[in-house]
């Protein structure tokens, strides 16, 4: 016991005599530190974390390599580093963990036709300091053509092809024949007579599954609908358009407004002979009611969609028409064809007598219509752009609801027998105007001959119209009358078609509405360009303009007929690459 006490006292004595001078030399600058870990191919930040995507193999199994890039404070090599990869994957409902040691790379095999996803933890350890850096990574396959740009190209019907531009990481994959990239052994080409493209992405509430749909409208009035990420045919031949061999419905233009994220987006399809079909969310169009009534003769040249109505200009009778939105709706996309429009096309009885004679729309050509719904979709008014048929003058008209159009179904029974054959402000039947009208001439608005390039997009803070003239794209301020050039094509090219990646006002499309896809022609050849704008509609200089006129084998595009960006439904959750 005395020995124990003596030892304790000796210890206290030792510590009492020790004086901490408080001066040490730590040479942290001499210690190598791993400051940053990155990868080739480049990873992006997704909702699940840092992610690398590889395209799913199309024809044979493929091994892809991930290489590590390091930023170290002192060293520049991997000589004194150990790399340990822990790979977590699902197999038969259980989590399997593989451990791989390599010198800065990882090879993963992907199988044809099978989706794959791996959760990986990379451990990089410095042998000299024992310091370790951990990085989590998700590696998965991406379907072919995911978040990519499709284009119809070809000089003549019967030889049209579906092209595609797909960006994976920092590399562009350009294909002049996307269909035969997937199906090289199929001799037929279902896009050979295509004249237009449409797209819709939504949540199918019946299956609780995202649905992506690319449709092609053909010169003979038929149509097809495909999963864009693999071009597998969907549904039946009469799904998009009702089959009509005697009076084919040939695509002219497609109008979209609303929010696809909550299935309140509406569509209107106009034919070359002035008929129209309508749809909600699904790309399944149907005609309005009473189409066999001779009083419903019309030739629609422009249309837009408000919160309550479809609104049209009828060139045949120089009048505005409207159609109340139909509440009938199926939550099952497979049965969308069973839903039909019950509401008739109604004369809006807009009175033109209050307009100056030079602004009277009678005899003018309606070339475009839209609504400004960036701030408030429910209160947005229809706007129609007209062209003087004898002069290069353009006029913009705004229709303001009088209130009678907001009675919805109550007004249907009341107006079902209204005279639909009168012109402008002439009265007949129930003649209460659905809208009042104001108008003005647009100064310095010169879109040239290609009026189909005129467009509006609600993504921008100012009320701009966009249009092409020759090889230039212009931004036109409808309030101030000034225009600015935002794109000039390479020498010899003229612009044939333009389309923003999205016109959706929903929350799941990120900044897609700021990207403008531009189709260009030069003789029998074509090209596709893209620019990005800011919310003030200035050119975003952080995004370099792209231009592609041939595929990876050197095969050139034909004349561009239409373009369409196909994005996944929840686009906001991923990096825009």
Image: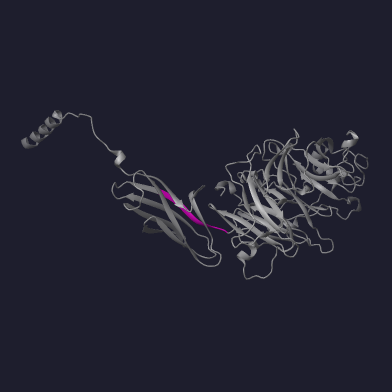
- Furthest toward the front, the residue is 491
Q: Is residue 23 above or below residue 292?
A: above
In this rendering, position of residue 229 left or right of residue 83:
right
Q: Is residue 346 above or below residue 523?
A: above
As rendered, which of 553 and 459 lies closer to the eye?
Answer: 553
Image position, residue 137 (x, y; %):
45, 51
As rendered, which of 339 and 62 lies closer to the eye?
Answer: 62
As rendered, which of 48 and 555 lies closer to the eye?
Answer: 555
- Furthest toward the left, the residue is 2
Does the magenta segment cover residue 138? Answer: yes
Magenta range is 135-143
Figure quadrant of the N terminus? top left
- Total marks shown come to 0
Residue visible at 36% across and 56% down in the picture: 103
Image position, residue 473 (x, y; %):
70, 44
Tell me if I can see residue 3 in this picture.
yes
> What color scheme is it?
one colour
Image position, residue 374 (x, y; %):
69, 38
In this rendering, position of residue 477 left or right of residue 100:
right
Q: Is residue 251 above or below residue 540?
A: below
Magenta stretch: dominant secondary structure: strand
As rendered, which of 522 and 398 lies closer to the eye?
Answer: 522
Residue visible at 64% across and 63% down in the picture: 179
Tell me if I can see residue 257 in this picture.
no
Does the magenta segment cover residue 289? Answer: no
Image position, residue 205 (x, y; %):
64, 52
In this rendering, position of residue 45 left or right of residue 223:
left
């Amino acid at each position: 016991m005395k020995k124990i006490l003596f030892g304790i006292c000796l210890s206290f004595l030792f510590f009492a005599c020790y004086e901490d001078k408080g001066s040490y030399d730590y040479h942290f600058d001499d210690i190598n530190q791993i400051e940053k870990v990155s990868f080739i191919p480049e990873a992006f930040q997704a909702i699940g974390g840092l992610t690398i995507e590889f395209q799913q193999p199309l024809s044979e199994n493929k091994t892809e390599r991930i290489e590590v890039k390091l930023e170290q404070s002192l060293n520049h090599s991997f000589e004194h580093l150990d790399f340990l990869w822990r790979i977590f994957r699902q197999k038969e409902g259980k989590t399997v963990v593989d451990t791989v040691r390599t010198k800065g790379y990882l090879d993963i095999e992907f199988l044809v036709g099978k989706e794959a996803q791996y959760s990986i933890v990379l451990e990089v350890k410095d042998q000299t300091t024992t310091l370790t850096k951990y990085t989590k990574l998700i590696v998965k396959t991406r379907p072919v053509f995911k978040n990519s740009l499709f284009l119809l190209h070809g000089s003549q019907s019967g030889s049209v092809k579906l092209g595609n531009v797909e960006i994976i990481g920092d590399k562009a994959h350009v294909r002049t024949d996307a269909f035969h990239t997937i199906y090289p052994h199929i001799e037929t080409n279902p896009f050979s007579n295509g004249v237009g493209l449409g797209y819709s992405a939504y949540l199918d509430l019946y299956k609780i599954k995202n649905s992506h749909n690319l449709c092609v409208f053909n010169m003979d009035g038929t149509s097809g609908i495909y999963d864009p990420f693999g071009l597998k045919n969907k549904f039946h031949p009469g799904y998009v358009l009702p089959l009509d061999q005697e009076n084919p419905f040939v695509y002219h233009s497609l109008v979209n407004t609303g929010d696809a994220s909550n299935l309140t987006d509406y569509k209107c399809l106009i034919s070359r002979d002035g008929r129209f079909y309508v749809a909600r969310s699904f790309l399944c169009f149907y005609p309005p009611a009473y189409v066999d009534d001779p009083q419903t003769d019309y030739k629609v040249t422009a249309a837009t969609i408000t919160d309550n109505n479809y609104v049209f200009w009828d060139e045949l009778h120089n009048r505005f028409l409207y159609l109340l939105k139909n509440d009938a709706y199926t939550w099952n996309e497979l049965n969308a064809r069973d839903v039909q429009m019950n509401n008739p096309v109604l004369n809006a009885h807009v009175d033109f007598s209050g307009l100056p004679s030079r602004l009277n729309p009678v005899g003018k050509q309606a070339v475009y219509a839209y609504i400004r719904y960036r701030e408030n979709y429910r209160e947005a008014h229809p706007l129609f752009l007209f062209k003087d048929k004898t002069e290069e003058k353009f006029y913009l008209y705004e229709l303001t609801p009088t209130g009678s159009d907001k009675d919805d179904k109550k007004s249907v029974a009341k107006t079902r027998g209204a005279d639909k054959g009168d012109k402008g402000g002439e009265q007949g039947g129930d003649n209460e105007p659905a809208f009042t009208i104001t108008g003005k001439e647009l100064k310095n608005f010169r879109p040239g001959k290609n009026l189909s390039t005129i467009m509006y997009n609600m993504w921008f803070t100012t009320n701009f119209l966009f249009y092409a003239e020759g090889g230039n794209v212009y931004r036109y301020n409808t309030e101030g009358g000034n225009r600015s050039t935002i794109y000039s094509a390479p020498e010899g090219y003229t612009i044939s078609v333009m389309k923003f990646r999205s016109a959706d006002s929903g929350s799941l499309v990120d900044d897609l509405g700021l990207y403008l896809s531009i189709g260009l022609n030069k003789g029998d050849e074509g090209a596709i360009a893209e620019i990005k704008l800011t919310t003030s509609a200035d050119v975003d200089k952080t995004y370099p303009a792209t231009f592609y006129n041939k595929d990876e084998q050197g095969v050139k595009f034909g004349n561009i007929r239409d373009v369409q960006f196909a994005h996944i439904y929840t686009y906001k959750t991923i990096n825009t690459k």
